[in-house]
Image: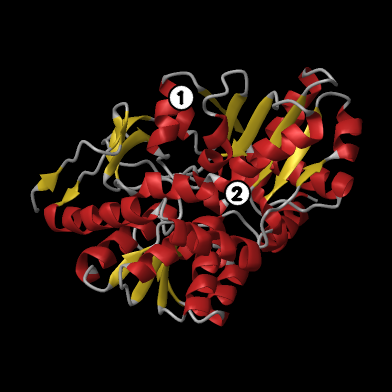
Amino acid sequence: MREQSVVEKGFYGEFGGSFIPEDLQKVLGILDAEFEKYKDDPDFQEEFRYYLREYVGRENPLTFARNLTNKLGGAKIYLKREDLNHTGAHKINNVIGQILLAKRMGATRIIAETGAGQHGVATATACAMFDIPCTVYMGKVDTKRQALNVFRMELLGAKVIPVEKGQGRLKDAVDAALEDLVANYQNTFYLLGSAVGPHPYPSIVKHFQAVISEESKRQIMEKEGKLPKAVIACVGGGSNAIGSFAHYLDEQEVRLIGVEPKEAPTMAEGVPAIIHGFKCLTLLDELGNPQPTYSIAAGLDYPGVGPEHSYLKTIGRAEYVSVTGEEALEAFQVLSKTEGIIPALESSHAVAHAIKLAKSLSKDDCIIVNLSGRGDKDVNQVFDMLDNVQ
């Protein structure tokens, strides 16, 4: 076992950091320096904004869910429409930013991990456009329940590698991707999809996903003339949620609410521990190892969470709640039938809590739900689940 290295930069309170082998620390040190060099560079920003506009399709709407609001009789519900992005989810925001960084660093190969497949599809899409070879690691269990996304990635030219080790889920895909990076760091850029991992990845992902709240904050002021009572987003690793929260962190009157699966209650039951090279709230088994998790939403199926979310919970700035798979499945159907919008199962967890919260608030209040992705990828899975119930 190589000596582990700890860097002080990149901590959120006690969470975060970089607990990785020395040779990999050198690679991520270069990544950190390049990110700091380019993140606010005018030319980089101009190119990033160009692709967000011309390729991703931003800015996307903040849609008033009139029918759902009227049905519930409480606060106005607004949906931040990340589902309308090219590739169908928020993941493409971060992918575009990181792949532009990879180009400037001279990478000739991109690797990624994926759970629900949306990050993998977004990465494969960008790699096709920029003509860079792409390998995506995906848990074998997830390749089966998200077979359509596997086909999409392969259609886009990516090599999808099913990971059989462990549970064959998202955690195991991350393990495999990190092993690849250690072996091939000379020419490989690991395009990490969530706000997790060793520093500087949580900072990088937040930076590129912050466009979500940058837009929604301006949009809600234009529509309502005031800030929302709450911003709600689902939380697995936490990329869409940290992007949804970023520009509201200093607005103390705005409640920030992350929603996780009750079947994988990392925020509710996790303890501080190191996983995948960083410290966060983590679900551990009796032996102190990451606990097997399960959620009907593959993208939320992770025993850890982003370090900034862990910190926001401990200082009380953000609230984290859980909903059951059954509640998410019901919300999936309710939003489809009331608004003609089929949400991803991940997003359905946020919708489920928003339905509860809206009922308890005044009609003068408004809340924003980040619709992190669309449900095309989940329709076959939901069909099977509902068919088994009947």
Circle 2: element type: loop
- Work out whether residue 288 or residue 30 is closer to the camera in this orientation and state it: 30
Give the number of the mark in front: 1 or 2.
Answer: 1
Coloring basis for residues: secondary structure
Q: Amino acid at mark 2?
A: Ile
Residue 205 rendering spot, x and y as whole percentages = 44, 49
- Work out whether residue 157 or residue 85 is closer to the camera in this orientation and state it: 85
Q: Residue at x 57, y 47 (%)?
A: 211
- Work out whether residue 197 or residue 55 is closer to the camera in this orientation and state it: 55
Residue 254 rendering spot, x and y as whole percentages = 62, 23
On the picture, is 143 further left or further right than 328? Answer: left
Q: Are marks 1 and 2 in contact (CB under 8 Å)?
A: no
Which residue position holds label 2?
296
Q: Residue at x 33, y 66 (%)?
A: 189
CA separation, marks 1 and 2?
24 Å
Circle 1: element type: helix
**Mark 2 nearby-residue class (10 Å; few <14, some 14–19, many ≥20):** many
- Work out whether residue 12 or residue 265 is closer to the camera in this orientation and state it: 12
Residue 33 rendering spot, x and y as whole percentages = 26, 53
Q: Residue at x 67, y 62 (%)?
A: 57
* Residue 87 in sight in this render: no
Which residue position holds label 1?
313
Q: Amino acid at mark 1?
A: Lys
Residue 8 rendering spot, x and y as whole percentages = 21, 36
User: How many tags in the picture?
Assistant: 2
Which labelled disc corresponds to residue 24? Answer: none
On the picture, is 210 further left or further right than 347? Answer: left
